[in-house]
Image (cartoon, rainbow, N blue to C red):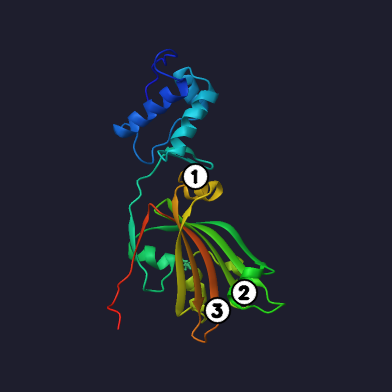
Amino acid sequence: FTPDAFSDAAAGPLYLQLHRRIADAIAAGRLRPGDSLPSERDMAAMTGLSRVTIRKGVEALVASGQLVQRRGSGTIVAPRVERLEQALSLLTSFTEDMARRGRRVESRWLDRTLAAPAPEEVMALGLGARDRVARLARVRISDGVPLAIERASLPARLLPDPDAIRHSLYAVLEARGCRPVRAVQRISAANLAAPDAALLEVPTGAAGLRIERVSYLASGQVAEFTRSLYRGDAYDFAVELKLAP
Ligand code: 16G
C-alpha cells in the first residue's frame, strides 16, 4: 500500500483511485489473503485522503468480495476459500466432516437456549402443546473461514441443557444415546441477505445454499430440525446415483 499522493483530477473519484490501488496490490500479491489493512485513521494519514473517502473505497472492495470486515479485528484481504466436496449420502456432523479432512473447527454462537417452540418447530418436530424446544444457532467456521450458519431446533427432552454444548451437537446426542440414524435433507438456492452475508464474510447477495435437515432417531421420533445457509463458493455436494429399477 503506497502512500503516494492521490490526484483529484483526471484519475476519477478519489475513493475509486483508492479502490483501484488496493485491488492492484491484491492482484500483484503485495497484499495477500488474510493480510490486515491499516485502520481507517492510519490509511487516512498515509494517503492524505479523508476517512469518509477511505471508508467508501473499502466498502466497495467489501461489496466485491475482495476485502472482509471482521468484528474486532478490522479489515483483511479475503482469505482464499478452498471448495469442499461433501457426500450427501452419509449422515455425518460438521465436526466429523472437518475432522476427517484434518481441518480445525470453531463455532460462533448466535443462540443456545430453551424456548417455547414457533409453529414451524411444532410441525417439524411433532411437539405437543407444552413441549419446549432447544435452539442452537451458530456460524460454523473451519480453518478460520466461516462456511455455514446453522440453526438447529431439537425437542428439549433430547437436549435439556443446550448451554452445555461446547463443540459437537452430534457428539452430545451420541453420549446421551440419542444420535440420529436417518435424515431427510432439502437443498435449494438462496442469495444471502445482508446480515447472513456479513456473518459468512461474503458480499450481500452472494450465492448460498439453503439446507434443511430433519433427522430421526431409531425409534422414528424426530431428533432435529436444522435450517442452514452454506456458502455457495465453498461447497460441492456429491451424491451417487443408481440406475432406476
Ligand atoms: C451438520 C448438519 C447439521 C447438524 C450438524 C451437527 C446440515 C446440512 N448438516 O452440519 O444438521 O446439526 O452437522 O454438527 O444441516 P456438530 O455435531 O458438529 O455440532
Q: Secondary structure at mark 2?
A: helix
Q: Does 29 appear above or below 119?
A: above
Numbered circles on residues, count: 3
Q: Earlier in the sequence, mark 2 or mark 3?
A: 2
Q: Does 204 appear above or below 96?
A: above
Asked if residue 170 can be seen in this view, the reply is yes
Q: Is residue 127 left or right of residue 67?
A: right
Quarter occupied by residue 155: bottom right
The amino acid marked with disc number 1 is Thr
The amino acid marked with disc number 3 is Val
Q: CA distance from mark 1 to mark 2?
A: 31 Å
Q: Does 98 appear above or below 222?
A: above
Q: Nearer the viewer, residue 159 or 151?
A: 151
Quarter occupied by residue 115: bottom right
Q: Earlier in the sequence, mark 1 or mark 2?
A: 2
Residue picked out by circle 1: 204
Q: Position of residue 48 (x, y in %)?
A: 48, 17
Q: Residue drawn at (52%, 85%), measured in percent from left and top?
A: 220
Q: Residue drawn at (42%, 28%), measured in percent from left and top?
A: 19
Q: Residue drawn at (48%, 72%), measured in percent from left and top?
A: 170
Q: Which mark is residue 123?
A: 2
